[in-house]
Amino acid sequence: MSKQNLTALDAAFWQIPTLDTNLLAAIQHKIDNKTKPLGALGQLEEVARQVSPYTKPTD
């Protein structure tokens, strides 16, 4: 990776916002209250927890 690419990557890294813990709790609540047994979707639920904060859920 060139120095220019590393500089761009470094700049992008510092633009990543911190995660709102209230949002994370709301996401977990929404996942848990789907019509399914808790944890039934296994790893898919973990992926949803990781991706949701960056997709800005509306409800």
Image (cartoon, helix red, strand yellow):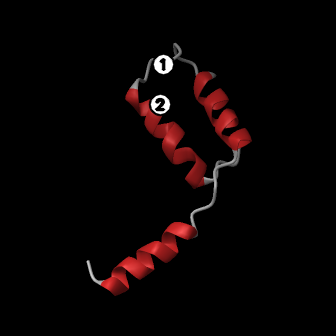
- Circle 1: element type: loop
Q: Compare marks 2 and 1 and give the one earlier in the sequence.
A: 1
For mark 2, what is the residue?
A: 45
Please determine whether, in this image, residue 48 is positioned above or below residue 34: below
Residue type marked 2: Glu
Disc 1 crowd rating (10 Å Cα; few below 14, some 14-19, many 20+) is: few
Q: Residue at x 41, y 32 (%)?
A: 44
Task: Give amino acid for label 1.
Answer: Gly
Residue at 73% across, 40% down: 22
Q: Label 2: few (<14), some or many (≥20) within 10 Å?
A: some
Residue 50 pos. (x, y %): 50, 42
* Marker disc for residue 16: none
Q: Residue furthest front?
A: 3
The structure residue drawn at horizontal position 53% and vertical position 38%, both measured from the top left corner, is 49
Q: Is residue 38 above or below residue 20?
A: above
Work out whether residue 6 or residue 50 is closer to the camera in this orientation and state it: 6
What residue did someone put label 1 on? 39
Question: Residue 23's x, y, as percent?
Answer: 69, 42
